[in-house]
Amino acid sequence: MDLKRIRNFVTLAEAGSFRRASERLHLAQPPLSVSIQKLEAELGTRLFDRGPAGVTLTVAGESVLREAKRLLFF
């Protein structure tokens, strides 16, 4: 797990959609999607529910988000 993936995760969680997150990160959507998939695989759990209106955090995703923010900002 690297800080770039964690930063991508936090940005996606805050943006609520891959499009908005990729714009904020100045990153194309496919690499962002791969980054999130790899993080989910590393953690062994789904972090987001994906739908036509965007993404929402799963219960596990909410827990990871708290820890990720602490890791990045403290």
Image: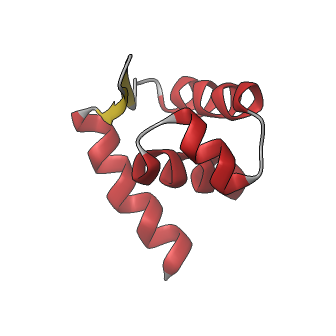
Choose between 61 and 27: the one closer to the eye: 27
Residue 45 placement, left or right of 4: left
Query: Does 11 appear above or below 47?
Result: below
Q: Residue 6 vs residue 44: left or right?
A: right
x, y percent for residue 67 = 39, 60
**Residue 9 in view (yes/no):** yes
Identify the residue shown where x is 67% and y is 58%: 3
In the picture, which quadrant includes the N terminus? Answer: top right
Q: Residue at x 70, y 54 (%)?
A: 25
Image label count: 0
Farthest-out residue, bottom: 74
Q: Nearer the viewer, residue 26 or 33?
A: 26
Q: Residue at x 45, y 49 (%)?
A: 15
Q: Residue 18 placed where, x, y %? A: 55, 34
Quarter of the figure with residue 66: bottom left
Q: Position of residue 41 (x, y in %)?
A: 56, 23
Displayed quadrant of residue 28:
top right
- Residue 65, image x and y in percent? 38, 53
Query: Which scheme is used to colour this image of the protein?
Result: secondary structure
65 to 55, vertically: above or below: below
Left or right, 40 with respect to 64, comes to right
Residue in the picture at 46% in, 24% down: 44
